[in-house]
Image (tube, rainbow, N blue to C red):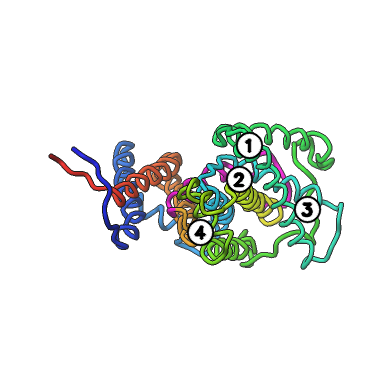
Amino acid sequence: MQIEPREHIAPWRIALAPVAAVFVSLLIGSVLILWVGAPVLEAYVLLVKGAVGSSFALTETLTRSIPLIFTGLAATIAFRAKFYNIGAEGQLYCGALAATFFGTGLITLPPLLMIPFLMLVGALAGGAALAVPVMLKTHLKVDEVVTTLLLNFVILLFVGYFLEGPLKDPMSMGWPQAEPIIDEGLFPSLVDKSRLHFGFIFALIGSVLCWAMMRFTVWGYEIRAVGLNASAAKFAGINVNATVIRTALISGGFAGIAGVSEVAGLKGYLTLDISPGFGYTGIAVAMLAQLNPLAVVLSALFISMIYVGADSMSRAINIPTYIADVLVGLSVLSILVSVMLTRYRVRFR
């Protein structure tokens, strides 16, 4: 058996790769569903119905996708420059903490100014959380996977300190939570009597802006060039270190806005469990989208459908909700294999 690169990659292979990955992950997931003694077809029908089968289910799926789009964009733009940011979870909490600090009464502005202000400070906080790892990467060649991953735990401890101390809500009956965001800083609702808020619109706008930047601007060209070949980019006159730093700050900014959307859009106040792992799932979103900012939206919707639909499936036929995590993991592994088979062919001799 020999693996060799393809001389020409057909566009249909690139388009088919994520579809094949989803199909394979569902096929393997069927084995697990059969293992627990449940009917496969009924399970998947219940999963889809639980995710989009009613207006309530649809709005919950869209709501769940908001932080996944932001963290998916954070991973997408960083990975494009070969800067492997695994710290979106911590950067999300930094954005949420900044929004809480400024949005609980320290500054009061009209809603048209207050909401963009909170998103700005959240983005700055998320970017600042990446400042140390990216400096270690560019100046000392320290592996950013290790530094960004370990920094997540430091940031969570830091947020826990504030929730138990300076920012703790005196009306929380002892629970570690911050004071609520003032009304001027809360995201408006998109659909009455639902949790869907304007963060979804902001996420769509962010996806389009990220795609436009990568496609039509000098910054985007430099990011793509550094990601494809840093040595060639440096030879062409691109400042590689400056490009990586800029990319990291933008990546952290998207993750920080994800935290703002959860605090000011969904929950209204900061707690330590505001994210069930959105930062890590964002990596799966980016990989499934093949690092395409526009495809991140579809990828985030697919993964949020799995998570929301899995709850309904579990209640109906008693399947463990952990099947959702398994399906997401299988999707990532499948897309990696699909991308490899897109670029390489296997020959048997």
Depth order, front residue of 285/171: 285
What is the three-letter code of the residue carrying label 3?
A: Ile
Q: Which residue is mark 3?
A: 181
Which residue is label 1 attached to? 139
Quadrant of image for the C terminus? top left
Q: Are marks 2 and 1 in contact (CB under 8 Å)?
A: yes
Tell me if label 2 and label 4 are in contact, CB under 8 Å. no
Q: CA distance from mark 2 to mark 1?
A: 8 Å
Residue 317, position as x, y percentages in the image? 39, 45
Mark 2 element type? helix
Quarter of image, res 337: top left
Left or right: residue 227 compared with residue 253: left
**Residue 258, visible in the rendered structure:** no
The percent position of residue 152, horizontal first and vertical second, equals 63, 36
Q: Please state which amino acid type lies under the numbered disc 1.
A: His
Measure how far apart labels 4 and 3 are at the Cα level.
30 Å
Q: Position of residue 145 (x, y in %)?
A: 54, 35
Residues at marks 1 and 3, CA–CA distance in whole angstroms: 39 Å
Return the residue at label 4. 293
Q: Are marks 1 and 3 in contact (CB under 8 Å)?
A: no
Work out how far the residue at label 1 is from the one at label 4, CA to CA, in angstroms.
29 Å
